[in-house]
Image (cartoon, rainbow, N blue to C red):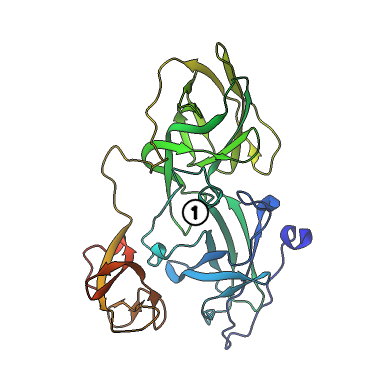
Amino acid sequence: VMATACNKENPSPVPSDQEPLIKVSASLYQFTKATDTAFEEGDEIGVNIFKGEEVYLYNASFTNTLGSFEPAVAHKWYKESDVVATITAVYPRTDALDSYSGTATFTVNADQSEKEGYKASDLLLATAASAPTESAISLPFKHALSKISITIENKLEEEIQNVWFTDVYGSVTYDPKAPFTTLEASGSKGTVKAYKSGDNSWVLIVAPQEEVAPKLALTTASGKQYTFILAENVNFTSGKVSTATVEVKETSIYTSFTPEISDWVADNELNFSQDDTDVELPEQGGNVTPEDPVTPQYCRLTFKVNKAIEWYDKYIYSWTGSSNSLTGVWPGAIASYEKEEGDYYVYYYDFPYSLNGTEIN
């Protein structure tokens, strides 16, 4: 595995009159995800192929099955065997990226206190280049966002129940054609609730951002809050971790960030000081609430199906023009169930907001 991840292989060329199937293999830079050491069974990535300015393949689904990434449907390479394409990939994959618009948006979970919410906040990106080949294209995934790790030395008589970071960006935008060079914090600042990864340790993932002054808030089982502020603005960098050690006492509270060697690359040193003013925290974590209106991420199509129709799954097949499919190959994408309404079941499907105003079939 080490050799496969570190060596650069020359893809096997193919005759120009053949169209081989597109195959990929995914590896993790430094072999880490948010709480895992490798891709797990069922993990799904979205693969993009850009042939010059042409979007040859976009958000194609490949799923980790018995140790290899298998496509939802087979995809063939283009015929020009000497044309090198840019290949990028995204984890986790989302159906919301079915149409390339030059930008994509990813938002972390504002409540990362549960393991699944924390894991789903870890955006991994990969980029490679290749001409058509019979070999699998190696996609080395790297962390796109920034991680914060906090160790709490609790000197109180009661337990620390929650850890929060306020005034941080939770969303990023990027161009899927050049994901690492176009990453940028977006939306408005909000509050993120951390995941308890050990007896005295807490972690959270935020967007890469510069010149921010987040506050650290600790709440106890009885609801008492301890709040800390930074002496100066800091940067949170893509792929890097900032590590803090916090000592909490009734009369004296001290905390500082220090770099450490970890699966993420160690980042800058930060110092907090106690602040007597409490910060307003969401009751259940909530979302990263924007202060100003932001562009919606999707256009929702809602439809009703008579209960007498006993199809198990409801599919949406949609297209523009004469044949530009928006929901994959026939029969399309599975719609999501919403609720019952009299004699009907209500379903919905979210199209990318980039299609807003477009006439679709």
Which residue extends farthest bottom?
A: 17
Quarter of the image for residue 299 reads bottom left
Left or right of residue 110: residue 28: right
Give the x, y percent position of residue 237: 54, 38
Which residue is nearer to you in this view: 238 or 177?
238
Does the image show residue 147?
no
**Is the residue 58 above or below the residue 38 in the image?**
below
Determine the residue positioned at 22% across, 72% down. Answer: 342
Determine the residue positioned at 55% across, 75% down. Answer: 71
Quarter of the image for residue 213 reads top left
**Quadrant of the snapshot with the C terminus:** bottom left
Which residue extends farthest top?
A: 251
Left or right of residue 261: residue 183: left
Regarding mark 1 in the picture, which secondary structure is present there? Answer: loop
Give the x, y percent position of residue 315: 36, 78
Determine the residue positioned at 57% across, 59% down. Answer: 127
Residue type highlighted by circle 1: Pro
Which residue is nearer to you in this view: 296 or 23?
296
Does the image show residue 239?
yes
Which residue is nearer to you in this view: 51 or 275?
275
How many numbered circles does the render carry? 1
Give the x, y percent position of residue 340: 28, 69
**Is the residue 348 above or below the residue 320 in the image?**
above
Determine the residue positioned at 42% across, 70% down. Answer: 54
Q: What residue is pinned by disc 1?
A: 179
Which residue is nearer to you in this view: 97 or 176?
97
Give the x, y percent position of residue 313: 39, 78
**Quadrant of the snapshot with the N terminus:** bottom right
Q: Residues within 10 Å of mark 1 (few under 14, many from 20)?
A: many
